[in-house]
Amino acid sequence: MIVGLQRTSRALFTALVLGALFGLWELLVQSGVIPAFILPAPSGVLLTAVNSFSRIAPHMLITLAAVGYGIASAFAAALVTALLMHRFRSVRIVLYPLLVISQTVPLIVLAPLFILWFGFGILPKVLVVILVCFFPIAVNTLEGLDSTDRDITDLFASMGAGGLRILFSAKLPAALPHLFSGLKIAATYSMIGAVIGEWLGGTKGLGVYMVRAQKAFAIDQVFAAILYISAISISLLLLVLFLQRLIMPWHKEARL
């Protein structure tokens, strides 16, 4: 009961703060303090988003496809990589520095190269999403595997479990909280990666739509696209939280 009241209080406080910020924004624009052609009012952005949905929807589907393929591929590759790095020290010595180096190269540089190498289709955007999502999932999962309680592994070993059995039956379940932490970061950043890839080169997608709206000085259309991007990012995060709660309901961070 107390926990439920605390959650309700937090939700109400968040809603009040956001309502106050958007109300101030609306007031500043409606009163003429901020010109609408520079920063449209929230009501105008929402109206434009609704009226432009039929035009934005095809672009949204393309971006969602890139995000879906990218996250799925990054998750599979990151999980396998983390398991290999934890299991084999030689693999960790070789791969871990490469993972760190991959995060030092700006996406703004890599995205045009992917387009040059793989064309203007969906593949370059998927690769950008993979690059964004792979690192947080792999590193967090590896940390979870490394930090497994020694008493748990000793218990499995005392019952005759081999290395692989301990890895998949003890260490991997114990690493789930870390894995989901990385997945939350990846889900949040995946839309950014897809939009950047589309922004720098593409024929369809929310990034392409934003570039065209920007060149046409349709600021309200740009903000409408941003609204959809934010809504999708939040939805992806909520989906990960739902999966975390479904798979590991015993963990405190899985409770919304």
Image (spheres, helix red, strand yellow):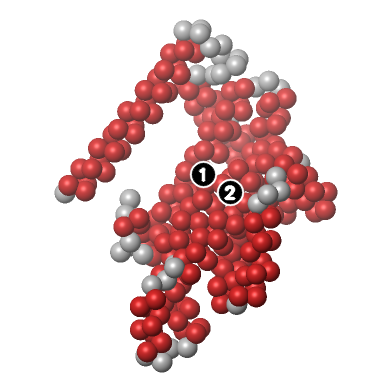
Q: Is residue 216 left or right of residue 172?
A: right
Residue 201: x and y in percent read 76, 41
Most extreme residue toward the right is 116
- Nearer to us in this view, 85 or 22: 85
How far apart are labels 1 and 2 at the CA level?
Answer: 8 Å
Kindly identify the amino acid type of the residue bearing the numbered disc 2.
Ser
Q: Secondary structure at mark 1?
A: helix
In the picture, measured across the screen, residue 26 lies left or right of residue 92, that is: left
Residue 243, quarter of the rendered image: bottom left
* Mark 1 burial class by Cα count in 10 Å: few <14, some 14-19, many 20+: some
State whether residue 10 is above or below residue 4: above
Q: Residue at x 41, y 92 (%)?
A: 160
Can residue 65 be seen?
no
Q: Residues within 10 Å of mark 2 (few under 14, many from 20)?
A: many
Q: Is residue 237 visible?
A: yes
Q: Are marks 1 and 2 in contact (CB under 8 Å)?
A: yes
Percent position of residue 167, x then y:
48, 78
Residue 190 numbered mark, or none: 2
Q: Which residue is mark 1?
A: 233
Q: Nearer the viewer, residue 52 or 228?
A: 228
